[in-house]
Amino acid sequence: MKIKKFAKKPNDLNDRVGKKLIVCYPNDSLDDNLKILHKARENLEKINEVIVSPRDAKTFIVEKGNFFRIESIKGPQVGDLNLFQLNNLEEKFYSGKTRAFYGTHLSVGDKMFSCFPYLRSMATITWDTLDWYGYDNDGGGVHDVIGTRCDPYTSKLLTDNDYHYCCHSNLTRALVKEKNLNINEAEKIVHDVLNVFMCTGFTDDTKQYFMKSSPVRPGDYLEFFAETDLLGVLSTCPGGDCGSEHSSDEAKCYPLKVSIWNVNKKYLKDIKLSTISSYNKNHGLE
Ligand SMILES: [Zn+2]
């Protein structure tokens, strides 16, 4: 927070402030497959679905070239999504760089990039039934990449409460139970999420992270195209629609549905799939 200003203003203040802003990472050079993907998605065939119970998480697999959807069923519910490369769990979603490319909230056409040293698009968002929401009067939007995930350590720090069904724990538990990882391995690879359906922003005055009741309703979904073989893990946040609190059993929670969709590959023949970074990893050492 930058509210109290202890330091004295410099004499050349006017020369130091009010400069022109520059977008850090112009993203125009990133491949745009959206026209092809929108044609392809008219021909989807469902091949699998997974229901994630309230205050829990489940894993799912999506082959490269398939689509997946995260859908609200039964009631408004926020989901916390982790993505891994199926055969190399060290390659995982990098919310910080994705945010640097696309801003605080994701929607159609935005790509979910993986961490270093891979830095490729793991998935492209192809449809978002909440894209009408845009940004509200508080600057709130849906599907953020600014929050990290609710977790028991922060809950303990702020409220001295041991709570075991935060998204961080749910994601860890799903990896332990379904992928046979031990708890330490699993917890280490859980990473900052895409907050699916969550409505969030930064407050005007202190720029603190806020949340408000999600506008999601049963039938709404967010759809992705997998650009590599993916292991997804989705947690149903204990905050429910995140309109009051999280990290407790107080909020009303609902399940979420993940569905996997196949498409005849003839619709994808012109697509440019992302590849892992070709940077030579020299880092100035040779
Ligand atoms: Zn959560």
Image (tube, rainbow, N blue to C red):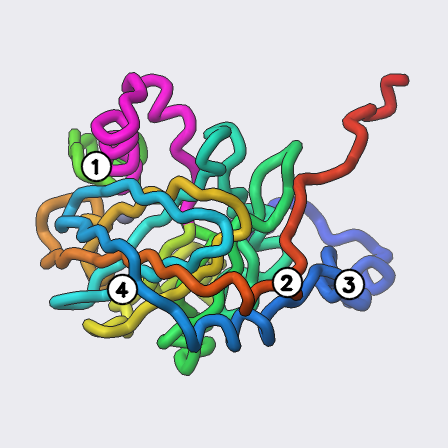
The reply to whether discs 1 and 3 touch (Cβ–Cβ < 8 Å) is: no
Query: Is disc 2 surrounded by few (<14), some (14 to 19) or many (20+) residues within 10 Å?
Result: some
Circle 3 is placed at which residue position? 22
- Horizontal side of 118 relative to 137 (left or right) equals right
- Nearest to the eye among marks 1 and 3: give it: 3
Q: Position of residue 273 (x, y in %)?
A: 63, 54
For the point 80% across and 29% down, the residue is 280
- Nearest to the eye among marks 4 and 3: give it: 4
Q: Distance between the residues labelled 4 and 3?
A: 36 Å
Q: Is mark 1 on a helix, strand or loop?
A: helix
Q: Distance between the residues labelled 2 and 4?
A: 26 Å
The reply to whether discs 2 and 4 touch (Cβ–Cβ < 8 Å) is: no
Label 1 within 8 A of ligand 1 by Cβ = no
Circle 4 is placed at which residue position? 71
Q: Position of residue 168 (x, y in %)?
A: 30, 36
Which residue occupies the foreground of this view, 134 or 35? 35
Which residue occupies the foreground of this view, 126 or 267? 267
Q: How far apart are marks 3 and 2 (CA)?
A: 31 Å
Circle 2 is placed at which residue position? 271
44 to 98, vertically: above or below:
below
Q: Position of residue 23 (x, y in %)?
A: 73, 62
Query: Is disc 3 surrounded by few (<14), some (14 to 19) or many (20+) residues within 10 Å?
Result: few
Which residue occupies the foreground of this view, 159 or 154? 154
Q: Which amino acid does label 4 sit on?
A: Glu
Query: Is disc 4 surrounded by few (<14), some (14 to 19) or many (20+) residues within 10 Å?
Result: many
Query: Is disc 1 surrounded by few (<14), some (14 to 19) or many (20+) residues within 10 Å?
Result: few
For the point 20% across and 31% down, the residue is 160
For the point 28% across and 19% down, the residue is 183
Q: Distance between the residues labelled 4 and 1?
A: 32 Å
Q: Which amino acid does label 2 sit on?
A: Ile
93 to 181, vertically: above or below:
below
